Each structure stands twice: as structure tokens, then as C-alpha cells.
Image (cartoon, rainbow, N blue to C red):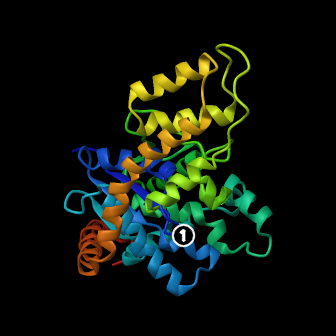
Amino acid sequence: MKDIVVSGIRSTGNLHLGNYFGAVANFIKMQHQHPCFFFVADYHSLTTHPNPVDLLANERQVIIEYLACGLDPEICTLYLQSDIPQTAELYLFLNMLAYLGELERVTTFKDKARKHPDNINAGLLTYPTLMAADVLIHKGAKVPVGKDQEQHLEMMRTFGNRFNRLYNVDYFPEPQAFNFGTELVKVPGLDGSGKMGKSEGEGNALFLCDDDKTIRKKIMRAVTDSGPTQLNQPKPDAIKNIFALMNLVSAKDTVNYFDEQYNNMTIRYGDLKKQLAEDMVLFINPLAQKISDLKQNDDYVTKVIAMGKEKAAASANKTITEVRKIIGFK
């Protein structure tokens, strides 16, 4: 049997190009190679106390955007975390095996506690335990994660192994990092430095729901410099970023043409950005149209969510029934 893949999806914010190339494109491939469970992590979002109206709207928007990108609910299991209460029960059991000291040492907890000293809630402290429950509830063996999540992945293994030792069973697998055998693509932002992300400002990211006018406007405002002053001059970070984006969506001949112009000092950044803008419109426009169409098809989205709930519940019920028996509950 192929390893089960489990991955959480943030329940806030629209998908941008960084999300697509950094994770979603891999999810599309994974669903055809492994049994996959992709869930919208709405329980996790409660650590920031979202408005109930926003929570509901964000959940549906995330489902819509992943469907538009190519996740197939007939092949993978796409569901809302809060639709599976068995996860919360396993979270409780794993919390009995998690110790204060190890939770307090988690890097992301320390960072968030420093940045938000007025909101150091218990859910934030036990975030790794809930993440472990999300994966172990389906006995997941592979988890698509970036470098910043490796500590959480190690804790999943710790809690699963601790359960196995305590109850003298070989029940939970050891989840391993999985990126589909490729290096994760790092998509740069439009501000000249760092990666693309909403936290750096709306103008730094290209969202999959952006219209053509917005895409062109954002790219034409992308940071550049005064141009090369010598032949074959190394590109500064801001210009590397423009070429990195072009490599994602433009034809190889187009990239080579502008690269040659840069090297011989004849490049015009306005032409470079106009070409990138048009290529980006051609890439994003079909996705934006699918998102728009799905937003008008409320019945279908509701059906997808119900289908995901049914499939995820069948897996979760089996696990939690077996876990309760192992622990000693009748």
C-alpha cells in the first residue's frame, strides 16, 4: 500500500503565486501518486480569534481556490478540519503525552509569544500537538513541509512513538517530510527582496484571483535599478527576482532574449516588465476565471465539502476507534 500523504492548508488569505509554485503544484501531482488528505486548518486559525463571518467565508474561498488549481475531490480527500471532531479527540489524547518543557521550546511558539505577548493562549502552546493529530488521525506517513516546519514534524514522530511505547503497540507510523522528490520552488516578491507573501504587503504578491489590470499594475511597480554599467555584470537581487518570475511563466526564448540584453547593457526594464506582465496574465487569467466560476456555483462547493467530510470521517473514525481500544476505553 502506498504511503498516505497529509497536509494542512491555511484557512486565511487568497492563494498567491508563491503558494502555487511552492506547494499547490506539488499537491496536484501527489494526488495522482498517493492517497492524499488535504484539509483547511480552521481549528488552527482560532489561536488568532477570527471573526465568525470571516472564518466561514475564508474556508469556502480556500476550497474554491484549490479546486481551481486542480485538486480533484474525486481523487484526493479535501475537507475542513473542523468537520472531523475525531481530530480534536486525538489532540486531547496526544496532549496527555506532551510535556510543557518541550512545547515551550518550539521555535514558532517562542516567536509568536514574543510578537504577540497579549495572546499567548494554550492553543498556541499546543499547536504542534494539534498538527500531530491532524496527520496521525489518518496514519499519515508523508507530510509536505518546508524548512520552517521540520521541528513540528519531529514532534509528530515524538508523540506517535511515545504513544506506541506507552501502550506497547506498533500503531502510529513515523511521518517523514515529503516534497515530491524536487526542491521546493522559492517565488520572490515584487519588492526586490525576500519571498512572495501577503505579510510583506498586498503589492508584494501576485494573487491567483487578481484581474489582468491588477497584475499589470503590480508588475510595472516591481523594484528594479538604474541598469547594468558593464558587460556581463552580475544581476542585483531585485533584477534576479524579475528574471526568476519570468522563468516561471515565460518561454525559454523570451528569458534568453532579455538575459542577453542585460548582459550586453541594452536592456530596457520597462520592456522587460511589460513582457513579464503579459506572460503572467496568460498564466493567472485561466485560474482567476475558474475561481470566479466556482464562486458562482455554491451548490457544487457545498457538495465538495460534504464529500470531503464523508471520506475524511471514515478514515478518522477507524483510527479513533482503534486508539480508544488501545488506551482502554470501551
Residue for point 44% across, 63% down: 209
Vertical comparison of 160 with 121: above or below: above
Vertical comparison of 56 with 186: above or below: below
Q: Quadrant of residue 268?
A: top right
Rendered-image quadrant of the N terminus: top left
Vertical comparison of 190 with 302: above or below: above
Check disc 1 and give the amino acid type: His
Vertical comparison of 271 with 284: above or below: above
Q: Is residue 52 left or right of residue 137?
A: right
Residue 310, position in %: x, y? 24, 73
Q: Is residue 100 left or right of residue 38?
A: right
Evaluate whether residue 218 shows in this view: yes
Q: Quadrant of residue 70?
A: bottom left
Q: Nearer the viewer, residue 52 or 315?
A: 52
Residue for point 67% across, 36% down: 238
Give the farthest residue toward the left: 74
Disc 1 marks which residue? 44
